[in-house]
Image: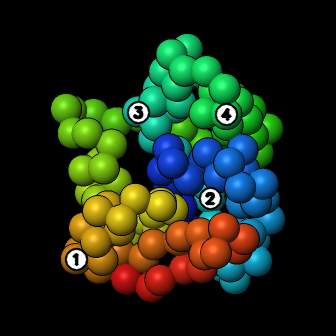
Amino acid sequence: MKQIIIDTNFLLIPGQFKVDIFSEFERVCDFPYKLCVLDKSVAELEKIVKGQKGKDKDAAKLALSLAKAKKVAVLKTKGSLNVDSELVEQGKKGCIVATQDNGLKARLKAVGASVITLRQRKYLIMAEG
């Protein structure tokens, strides 16, 4: 079973673009998978909920509630790596990373990791590593 690790910005997609990323994962992935999120990403979302107003706060609240409702596993991180570096390390181990961050996508492709991204604000695609 492959692990798909969802980046913070990716969890905001349902609130920002009204795209059901969970049904899109089912459409794109024709293999058994487990959805995960880093504990640091959850902390980033909680920080947005506490510290921001308007659409970003609403999107972060929705992201947290969807992650809980869909039983997305929270991966504990060790050490002082930031979220992006942690995701690159996970990508090296064969995990698929779902992200919208262009810099992170380039780093993941450089290490041969598979990446799932949003296209045309409508649907997901997977780039094999």
Q: Residue furthest front?
A: 54
The tag earlier along the polypeptide, 1 or 2, is 2
On the image, numbered disc 4 is attached to which residue? 55
Give how far apart the Cα atoms at labels 4 and 1 are. Answer: 33 Å
The residue lying toward the viewer, choosing from 4 and 118, is 118
Vertical position of residue 21 compared to residue 113: above or below = above
| 51 lies above or below 118 | above
Residue 22 in the image: x percent, y percent?
Answer: 75, 59
Residue underneath mark 3: 40
Q: Amino acid at mark 1?
A: Ala
Q: Residues within 10 Å of mark 4 (few under 14, many from 20)?
A: few
Name the image quarter holding residue 46.
top right
Label 4 close to label 2 by CB (< 8 Å) = no
**Distance from Cα at disc 1 to Cα at disc 2:** 24 Å
Q: Residue at x 79, y 38 (%)?
A: 69
Local SS, label 2: strand
Badge 4 or badge 1: first in the primary sequence: 4
Establish if 51 lies above or below 68.
Answer: above
Left or right placement of residue 22 versus residue 76 in this view? right
Q: Which mark is residue 34?
A: 2
Q: Mark 2, mark 3: which one is toward the viewer?
A: 3
Tell me where residue 117 appears, x and y as whole percent: 53, 70
Identify the residue at horizontal 68%, vertical 48% (top origin).
16
